[in-house]
Amino acid sequence: MALKFPGTNKNKGRKDDEGGKKTGRRQLISNILTVIIVFMLITSLYSVITETTGGKIEEIAVSEVAKHVTAGEVKKITVEGEKLTILLNDETELKSKKEREASLSETLSNYGVTAAQLARTEIEIKGDTGLSFWLMNILPFLGPILILFLFFWFLSRQMKGAGIQAFSFGQSKARIIDPSDVNQKVTFKDIAGVKEAKEELKEIVDFLRNPKKFLDIGARIPKGVLLMGAPGTGKTLLARAVAGEAGVPFFHLSGSEFVEMFVGVGASRVRDLFQMAKKSAPAIIFVDEIDAVGRVRGTGVGGGNDEREQTLNQILVEMDGFEPTEKVIVMAATNRPDVLDPALLRPGRFDRRVTLDLPDRNDREEILKIHAHKKPLAEDVNIRTVAERTPGFSGADLYSLMNEGAILAAREDRKKVSQYDLIRAIEKVMLGPERKSHVLSKKEKEITAYHEGGHALTSSVLPYADPVHKITIVARGHAGGYTLKLPLEERRLQSRKEFLDDIAVSLGGYVAEEMIFGDITTGPSNDLQVATALARDMVTKYGMSALGPMALEGMGGRTIFGKGLNEREYSEDVSSKIDAEVAKILNEAFAKTRKVLKDHRRALDSIALALIDKETLEQAEYEQIIIANGIMPKKREEMNLAAQ
């Protein structure tokens, strides 16, 4: 349970968007300026080199050439078109030009050079080659054009979504993982837990490797496999493992990547994707978050835009067009299977559904070992203990836990990750980082200590509540303090008695504040929301009230999909009875919690004083306090007896 302080940032999303746009504009301007500066530097460098190389040889007029020839000072003249290269007797080299149409002898004779004088000079005539002729004539015109072309090509590369990319709207944006890419290859050995899901998917792997075995006996492997599970349970990773085990190309994209602002683009991308997969068959197409395009049609959800429905229709058509010999499997993932269109789930399409549950204690231990593979662990690390303290963690949460533990160790300049780092990482993943700058006043510290003490004491006394592992009044994330309760054993089912005790524990902070200080703060606001939501679920979803076995709301507190977000399927009279039952459950829990804290007031004072002094109590310290006040900690055997 957490003591929550109010406060929110309403403009964060808007500021992020504006900041992203400004960053993009600054990047574009920076790229344009870079290209202009480089262009100017190249031009300046070319001019300098030309002037430097051209200044080494003196260029003279033809009349001067004639004077040197008449004086007998010229050793050799090289004629190359209209250009003259004159080499004097003292090895001095000069340059000159003549008329292209006139010969050298004709030009010099016009300046009074006789045939005898010209005969004493060696004359070499070089003709222009075809390549040099064309280069000399074309480059002055073609060079600037090429530079401008490269300039605009570079700009078009920077402006994503414009220019050249306008012609690729209808092409699939799927990312392809090649089976020969060792760095990206994933197999079942890289995934811990989900044993049942892996067994189901081994049939898909076998079909992709050896389809003849299935076809010979008349069996047809499912065309579509739908992976369902909570976020972070490893749906995408498992799909990649199927492709890695089968050694086939893996086409991966998100459902939202089909839909664009232009109508028909999504359907075009679907066609292009399936054509690519058929050419690479055997192959796997994986559509992540398929509920982005696969929601129930005709509900009006989505702003009336039928682009999503057209995309869904094209997916259905492509899956119907598959032949058993094409060896293309379509896999999809979603954490909202309840909103998918029935046409997607009928036999012949996504008729194989694989559910991925949150890992149990043993699976969590195996997952932690995989993520700890390349991390140096200290001798005191106990992966089993970490797995026991992380019920409800998904595979992604466990990855984040190990990563945060390594970051904490590196931040403190240690070479190995210790158990203390991992324990702190658990709390950081659950609640957020410590807010050491959030200093409480003496009065607030006392209120927070009694608040958390009320949660912990109620949980220790009530028989169906979970035992306490830690209490702290150090702010973390949005919580001003928290009480960490963990079950002794993994539970798949929860009874009515356990729900009632959980509600009573949630009200422990509220009751403690009212009983000790005679006033209520904003701290218990989150606790009240949790308790009220749980009580309403007991009445409307689980049939745990006087209303009897009636399910009045769907998953997540919503009415049946398609009936409207605010439309109810029960009368006002039933609604009043629901409110009365919820109030009854909360009032009974309030009375139960008040009796517990009143009967054990001395234990509550001891816990609060210890928290004010130390700020954090671990399980051993906390149990010493309650034992001294006549309350025995819960053991595994006692919890089993209580459950029976």
Image: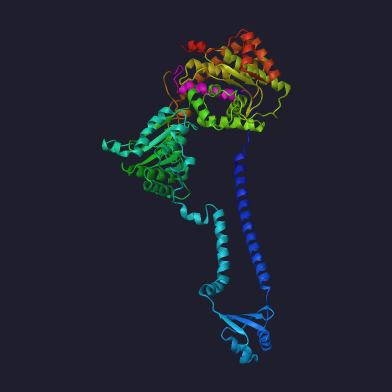
> Colour mode?
rainbow
Residue 11 horizontal/vertical position (percent): 62, 39
Q: Say if residue 466 shows up in the picture.
A: yes
Residue 95 horizontal/vertical position (percent): 65, 79
Residue ranking furthest to the right:
442
- Image quarter of the N terminus: top right
Q: Quadrant of residue 513?
A: top right
Residue in the foreground of this view, choosing between 398 and 67: 67
Was residue 539 drawn as part of the magenta stretch in this picture? yes
Q: In which quarter of the image is residue 316?
A: top left
Residue sitting at 48 percent across and 49 percent down?
261
Q: Quadrant of residue 5?
A: top right
Q: Say if residue 296 shows up in the picture.
A: no
Residue in the foreground of this view, choosing between 97 and 274: 97
Residue in the foreground of this view, choosing between 438 and 556: 438
Residue sitting at 63 percent across and 51 percent down?
26
Q: Is residue 179 above or below residue 155?
A: above
Residue 385 horizontal/vertical position (percent): 55, 21
Residue sitting at 66 percent across and 17 percent down?
450
Residue 99 horizontal/vertical position (percent): 60, 84
Question: For the stretch drawn in magenta, what is the main secondary structure?
Answer: helix
Residue in the foreground of this view, choosing between 351 and 573: 351
Q: Is residue 76 above or below residue 39?
A: below
Magenta segment: 523-547
Was residue 275 drawn as part of the magenta stretch in this picture? no
